[in-house]
Image (cartoon, grey):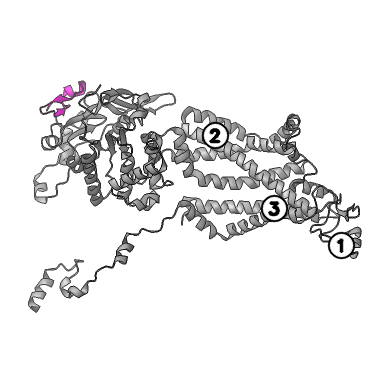
Amino acid sequence: MSSEYLIEVEDLKQYFPIKTGFFKTTPLKAVDGVTFQIKPGETLGLVGESGCGKTTVGRSILRLYEPTSGTVKYNGEVITDKNMAEHRKNMQMVFQDPYSSLNPRMTVEDIIGEPLDVHKLYSNRKERREKILGLMELVGLNAEHATRYAHEFSGGQRQRIGIARALAVNPKFIVCDEAVSALDVSIQAQVINMFEDLQEKLGVAYLFIAHDLLVVRHISTRIAVMYLGKVVEIGDADEVYDHPIHPYTESLLSAVPIPDPIIAKKSQRIVLSGDVPSPMNMPTGCAFRTRCRYATDKCAEVCPSLADKGNGHMVACHNR
Amino acid sequence: MAEQMEKNSLKKNVLSAQIDLSKFNFDESSFEKATEEEKRQQDVMSESTTFFKDGMKKLMRNPLAVASIIVLVLILGVIIVAPHVVPYSYSQIISVNGKRDKTAKNLKPFEYSENELKYMEEGGKVFPHIMGTDSQCRDYFIRVVYGTRVSLSVGLFASILVLIIGLLYGSISGYLGGKVDLIMMRVVDIIYSLPDMLVIILLSVVLNETLKPLLEGTILQKLGVNMISLFIVYGLLYWVGMARLVRGQILTIKNNEYVLAAKATGAKGGRIIMKHIIPNCISVIIISTALQIPSAIFTESYLSFIGLGVQAPMPSLGSLANTAREGLQSYPYKLIFPAVVICLIVLSLNLLGDGLRDAFDPKLKK
């Protein structure tokens, strides 16, 4: 069974039980019914404010958390606990913090070699070493770095090690969980260019989670905007950036700093009032209605679902 | 020209940190090409130091730790070499010229018996009794050496036993977490609350009877049933501290992102514990094992002292001290020798453990 899409996420829900009383637990709805698809070799950018469930989506797809409900399909095949062990070869992850995501007691060679060890992808020591050196060259590390420990490297180099580790099993899909957020701007540019080069060379698809909107626009083919565990808008990158429809996306994009002060003075910033509601106590209907300028009575009753506004640009809003 | 320069300097903001390049005269000769060696020096990173090397360096800078290493090495050297050099045995009466010497009773250090003096006058050679002899005409030095051998090996093996049980139990409890952790830790709490000395005495009495027929005819019999039961008792009671320590360490380490990364690559629980979690808390474990050895030696000495330790004629430091108690008024040195050795071992192991903790604990970094 094969399909047009590499990854299909359908109605993915991830609730965490939180103890609120002695015997009572309340579910924290970190991800609440997320649906999207990723084609082979495509990059889907996932944006949203802190705590909206971006990282949880990435981790649930890779089954680092057991999803509460919903399915994830790889190449049309539903992923279960049983076949996930096999699929870990196809789906990998690059982590946000290059400082804590590398084991301080392992050499670079062992860190990159770990996926090879786990999946037994070599027949002898020599082949293992050759593969590791090949990966290091691919991400721009010198062969002499192989015997060093992670703490001896700079942030950018560490992130390269993390990327080499993800590439070791030759995956078709990589979740980049804020992979450039912890790096300074010049290193960010290097790493992003490397991501693009690797996509060209190896044809991998990315789920690129970030909160730097300009970075996401640069790298993504399509973009999904999340708010409180739900996808509120999804579409082609330029389409979403140039013609945002959902009021949340509008305000999010208006917050992007503009490098030209003359244009910046003219542009109007949409400031949201109030705070993000607690995901343990969500508003009825549309989650965004408490802060929305267009909110009507209908918003409090019916939760809007994603509707196509043309060109595959899907928006979840009653009023736009 | 001068006017123009004045104009330039006027344009510049007074507070600007920009260097006015017009004040310098640059030409071709101002710059030198970097040599190949200089280029290479730029590439070389600082020397690779591992966590272990760094810790050892710090340990060697601690005078107390170095002194205790020296003392321990000396004691180890003596107990390994002495039995091959000294012609006496720990269990046999001293014999002179092939005859048992009944006059060599309760000699003072470096004193010779009547028979020995006679033999030396005839031209024979007698090895001096460095620590004198005991009431049964046995050389006391060799008995202290064997006693130290027994005590040290008890300490070492008992700590290794504690290490293995505690490490396994603690890592499983900490890694699985949740309800498993809850139940496993309540078991630890119960064992922790038992009065340990009382349990040790009761258990060694019971185990003595049950183990005796089992050990008949094996090498272990020579060591004595008491010793084996001591290991078992020690292993049963003292692993709880280690298990708690390991669990606590694992709880903090397992939330690190590199453990999550290992899970994402598909690593199983056993591999994650062995490759990621244990190496990151090994320093704490080594230190606590080093501190466990003196405690085991102390327990052994205590048990031997009250008569539940090694089987006679095999000496241990505790049983030597116990025998010395009887003639304490006339021969006080017989208590002093084993007591000093116990003190030296326990003190130096404690100091070494402290030194290891200071050297390897990253939180204590200056």
**B262 in relation to A159, above or below:** above
Q: Quadrant of residue A216?
A: top left
Q: Please, which chain is the residue tagged with disc 3 on?
A: B
Q: Which residue is mark 1?
A: B124
Q: Position of residue A317 (x, y in %)?
A: 16, 26
CA distance for labels 1 and 3: 27 Å
**B240 in relation to B113, above or below:** above
Q: Is residue B181 magenta?
A: no
Residue situated in front as seen by the camera: A190 or B63 = A190
- Secondary structure of the residue carrying numbered label 3: helix
Q: Nearer the viewer, mark 2 or mark 1?
A: 1
- Secondary structure of the residue carrying numbered label 2: helix
Q: Residues in magenta?
A: A294-320
Give, as a three-letter code, the residue at label 1. Answer: Gly
CA distance for labels 2 and 3: 35 Å
Pointer 1 local density, CA inside 10 Å: few below 14, some 14–19, many at least 20: few
Q: Please, which chain is the residue tagged with disc 1 on?
A: B
- Which residue is most to the bottom? B2
Labels 2 and 1 within one chain = yes
Residue situated in front as seen by the camera: A208 or A74 = A74
Q: Is residue A302 magenta?
A: yes
Q: Which residue is mark 3?
A: B80
Q: Position of residue A31 (x, y in %)?
A: 29, 28
Q: Is residue B265 left or right of residue B25?
A: right
Give, as a three-letter code, the residue at label 3. Answer: Ile
Pointer 2 local density, CA inside 10 Å: few below 14, some 14–19, many at least 20: many
Between discs 2 and 3, the one toward the N terminus: 3
